[in-house]
Image (cartoon, rainbow, N blue to C red):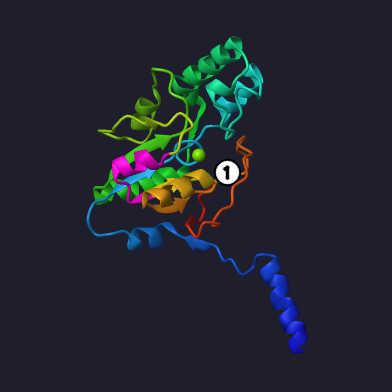
Amino acid sequence: MITRSLFLLALAAALGFGQTIRWITLEQLQKSLPKEAISVVFDIDDTTLFTSAGFQWGTKVYGKDIVSAGVSVKEEDLPSAEARTKYREFWTKMNNGLDEYSVKKWIAVELIRLHRERGDTIHFVTKRIFTGTETLTALIKESFGFTDLDPVIFTNRGSKTPAFRKIGAVVSYGDSDGDIRESIAAGARPIRVMRGRNSVNLEPVQNGAFGEEVLINSEM
Ligand SMILES: [Mg+2]
């Protein structure tokens, strides 16, 4: 009997059942926040906006070597001047209009409302490529009803940690493992927003794997 129990325990551990995900509801999150106003930060793609339409279009038109959601293709890694031109063309379009086809995530609406009611300062940081102009800030401002909003910070595929530090982010929302890792590095509390299952970003994510809290019902 004891042998059998030990065997089942070992099996459960091997299958990862021992690692329980720290699920959190919006209500629990609200109660856990400090009394004073804080600075919070949101990722854009698959956290604030469901942006798959633009990326899907980009991959179809420019090819997956140039546009692939979630894959950190850098301009300097591209083989030709032509490829680099296409790359800049896509990112210019993505940041200056394609988000007209992006859909607000329900969870982002709720989170932004929650933080606004607390008087928190809300920032947006993305790893997208900045090509000189963007209408993303204006779109977010309008879509979420901000009266005042600092421009979205673009890290051009680089780590978000310096931006998180600069903002003084206390809480950080993101769907990617990188968001969580870089939040921890900056000393911010990472909260995982789950990527929708229909996202064209197929980069693997390990929700809860960093010991971070995972928001329930955050896929949409
Ligand atoms: Mg994202």
Residue closest to the eye, 193 or 161: 161
- Is residue 188 part of the magenta span, yes or no? no
Crowding near pointer 1: few (<14 within 10 Å), some, many (20+)?
some
Measuring 59% from the left and 52% from the top, which residue is drawn there? 206
Query: Residue 118 at x, y = what percent?
Result: 26, 51
Q: Find residue 68 and report its image quarter.
A: top right
Residue closest to the eye, 143 or 89: 89
Where is 21 relative to 133, above or below? below
Quadrant assignment for the N terminus: bottom right
Q: Secondary structure at mark 1?
A: loop
One can see residue 42 in this view = yes
Query: Residue 15 at x, y = what percent?
Result: 70, 65
What residue is shown with label 1? 196
Q: Amino acid at mark 1?
A: Gly
Highlighted magenta segment, given as a residue range:
160-171
Query: Residue 114 at x, y = what percent?
Result: 33, 50
- Judged left or right of residue 36, residue 10 is right
Q: Find residue 57 and report its image quarter.
A: top right
**Mark 1 close to ligand 1, CB under 8 Å:** no
One can see residue 220 in this view = no
- Judged left or right of residue 31, residue 131 is right
Extreme residue toward the bottom, this view: 1
Extreme residue toward the top, this view: 82
Measuring 34% from the left and 62% from the top, which residue is drawn there? 32
Where is 156 relative to 199, above or below? above
Measuring 77% from the left and 83% from the top, which residue is drawn there? 4
